[in-house]
Every structure is written in C-alpha cells, then in structure tokens.
Image (tube, helix red, strand yellow):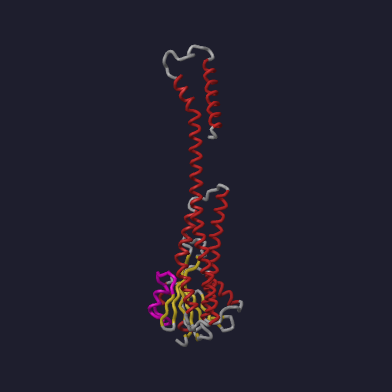
C-alpha cells in the first residue's frame, strides 16, 4: 500500500496517533493526512477496547491473518511477514504497580514503510520514551527507526529489571551471611519472575536477530546495525538472567543448610538437657515412691542432703561433657 489516507487512520479510543514529519518530530493525524514512506504514521491502541477491536476487524490496512494477532491471546515473541507488512509480537516489563507476579506484558506491532500500528493493554514505558523523543524533536524519521527506538527502550527496561532481580538476590546472599532468613515467599516469587523472563526473552532475542539479519524494506543499514546491537545486549541480559537463576539455587541450598544447622543445634541442646536431667529424674522418681524403707525418710535434713547430691551429680555430668568436648 503506497499511501494511507487519514480517514483510514481515524480510530475511536486511540491512545496515540501521530505522523512523523521527517524532521525528528511529529504532526497530528487528521482526515487530510496522507501517510507515505517519508512521512509515515504511527497509531498506538489499547486492544481491549471494544471500539478498537471493531476497527481492527474492519480495517483494510493489514491482512486478515494479522488482525486477530493484533488483539488475540498469542503473546509468545515472533515475527511474521505477509506482502509488504510485518507483524511483530514482543514482551516487555509490566510497569503497573498492581501487577501480578508475571512481570511481562505484550506489545504487538504491525508495520509497513508508511505505517506502524502498535497495540497493548497496560502502559509501556518504551512508548512514552519514543513520544518524549518526538516532542523534543530527537525522534525517529521513518517506521524502521521508530521500531528500533521502541525495541531499544524495551531492552533497556528488561535489562534494568534483570539488574533489579540480581540485586535482590545479592541482598538475600548478604543477609544469609548474617544468619538472616528471608520472608516466606520471597525466593519463589523471584524465581518465578526469572523463569517467566527467560521463557519469553529467548525467542525475543531470536526475533531481534532476525530483524537485524533480514532485508526488510522499511529498515536501512543503520537500523540493522543498531538492531544487532540491541540483540547482543539482550543476549548479555539473558546471560545475567541465567547467572541469577543459578545464584537463587545457591541461596535456596544455603537456606536449607542454615535451617538444618539451626534444627541440629536445637536437637543437640535438647539432648544435652536430657543427659543433664536424666540422673536427677531417676533419683527423684526413685525417692518419690510412697513405700516404706526410703533411706532418710525419717531423718531431719535428708531433703537438703538429697538436693546437694543432685547438684553434685549435675556438676560431675557437666565436667564429663566438657572433658569429652561435647560442650
């Protein structure tokens, strides 16, 4: 499609709708707007809105096979081409303060040389970053550079999140050195986030590598080189992710070892107490029977002598344990 008219880009409930002016800035989209390769358009949508879903189903700007993907349930990172258009499904960090343990949200992008349509449900920081660049007139000038800017910011968010998880694991390690156990549920949550990240970022790295290697008509050589750098940076983030997963396993082993050591110490202490008081228990039980003929039963001061004898027995047992290096 060589030209897209403004009437085709009027979307109800649209989040952002801009036309790149070719000078690192943007223009508003109106019914008189014509999207071309030199001045492409970008519309950003919330695919959960019923009006947006209806527009996607009725729009002639993308193939029918891509319409469902732009608002469907598929969230695994992938890239698909059909004609002049390319569909890209990506995962990025959930910035919502009320987010669930799953830390990722989905960003779907369809683009040609003169049009980029992106859709998500939750706010994505990368979109705001690119809009801020356009407002400062330092933004992209064509759809290829717009996509690269988005992916660059996405990767920065992912890298920061991985660094944050890595710092949390280091704090747990430092706490264990001081015999401080983490709260219940902290380690499982971190491990779940790490596993979810790894599951989706590995195919996302493959998507980035494909974008850098294939000859897409809307991407120039500078964009491909930048895309390769982004793919390599994500690869280094995955290496850090694997290292963090390994460190959580070490933390769990150390916690189990520490708890086992604490339990053994308590059992050992209880065993020593049992050894100390077992003779006294035997003697008190023996002299406590209600039968005639108990030694000292009629003698004044026998109870004091008996208590002194118990203390002597305890001192002897303590001396023997100390000598055997049990305590």
Which is more toward the observer, 135 or 231?
231
Residue range (magenta): 57-78
**Residue 213 percent across, percent down from the top left:** 48, 78
Q: In which quarter of the image is the C terminus?
A: top right
Name the residue rendered at 51%, 42% in the picture. 262
Residue 263 inside the magenta-drawn segment: no
Judged from this view, the residue extending furthest toward the left is 65
Task: Locate the N terminus by quadrant.
Answer: bottom left
Residue 2 spot, x, y in % from top left: 46, 88
Above or below, 13 against 278 in this view is below
Q: Please state which of residues 297 and 295 is positioned toward the viewer in this rendering.
A: 295
Q: Please report the residue visible at 51 percent of the width from the left and 46 percent of the height from the top.
A: 258
Residue 261: horizontal and vertical position, in percent? 50, 43
What residue do we see at 57% from left, 52% from top?
A: 174
Q: Nearer the viewer, residue 139 or 252?
A: 252
Determine whether 279 is above or below 132 in the image: above
Visible residue check, residue 120? no
| Any part of residue 294 in sight | yes
Q: How many marks?
A: 0
| Residue sitting at the far bottom | 2
- When the figure is inspected, residue 197 is found, relative to residue 18, above or below; the finding is above
- Residue at 47 percent across and 55 percent down: it is 188
From the top left corner, tell me how far across and down residue 310 is, in percent. 52, 23
Q: Nearer the viewer, residue 267 or 199?
A: 267
| Residue lying farthest to the front in this orientation | 324
Residue 74 in the magenta stretch? The answer is yes
Give residue 47's quadrant in the image: bottom left
């Amino acid at each position: 499609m060589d030209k897209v008219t403004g009437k085709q880009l009027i979307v109800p409930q649209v989040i952002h709708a801009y036309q790149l002016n070719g000078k690192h800035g943007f223009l508003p989209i109106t019914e008189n707007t014509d999207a071309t390769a030199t001045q492409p358009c970008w519309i950003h949508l919330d695919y959960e809105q019923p009006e947006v879903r209806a527009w996607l189903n009725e729009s002639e700007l993308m193939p029918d096979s891509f319409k469902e993907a732009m608002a469907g349930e598929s969230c695994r990172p992938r890239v698909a081409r059909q004609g002049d258009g390319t569909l890209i499904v990506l995962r990025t960090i959930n910035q919502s303060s009320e987010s669930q343990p799953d830390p990722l949200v989905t960003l779907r992008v369809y683009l040609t040389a003169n049009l980029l349509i992106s859709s998500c449900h939750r706010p994505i920081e990368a979109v705001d970053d690119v809009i801020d660049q356009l407002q400062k007139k330092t933004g992209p000038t064509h759809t290829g550079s717009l996509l690269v800017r988005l992916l660059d910011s996405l990767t920065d968010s992912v890298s920061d999140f991985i660094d944050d998880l890595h710092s949390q694991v280091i704090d747990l390690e430092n706490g264990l050195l001081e015999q401080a156990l983490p709260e219940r549920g902290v380690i499982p949550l971190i491990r779940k986030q790490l596993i979810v990240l790894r599951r989706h970022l590995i195919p996302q790295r493959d998507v980035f590598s494909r974008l850098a290697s294939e000859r897409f008509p809307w991407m120039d050589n500078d964009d491909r080189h930048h895309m390769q750098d982004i793919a390599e940076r994500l690869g280094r983030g995955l290496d850090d992710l694997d290292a963090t997963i390994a460190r959580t396993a070490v933390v769990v082993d150390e916690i189990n070892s520490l708890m086992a050591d604490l339990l053994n110490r308590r059992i050992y202490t209880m065993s020593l107490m049992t050894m100390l008081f077992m003779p006294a228990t035997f003697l008190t039980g023996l002299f406590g029977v209600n039968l005639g003929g108990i030694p000292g039963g009629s003698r004044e001061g026998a109870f004091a002598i008996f208590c002194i004898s118990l203390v002597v027995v305890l001192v002897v047992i303590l001396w023997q344990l100390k000598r055997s290096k049990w305590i």
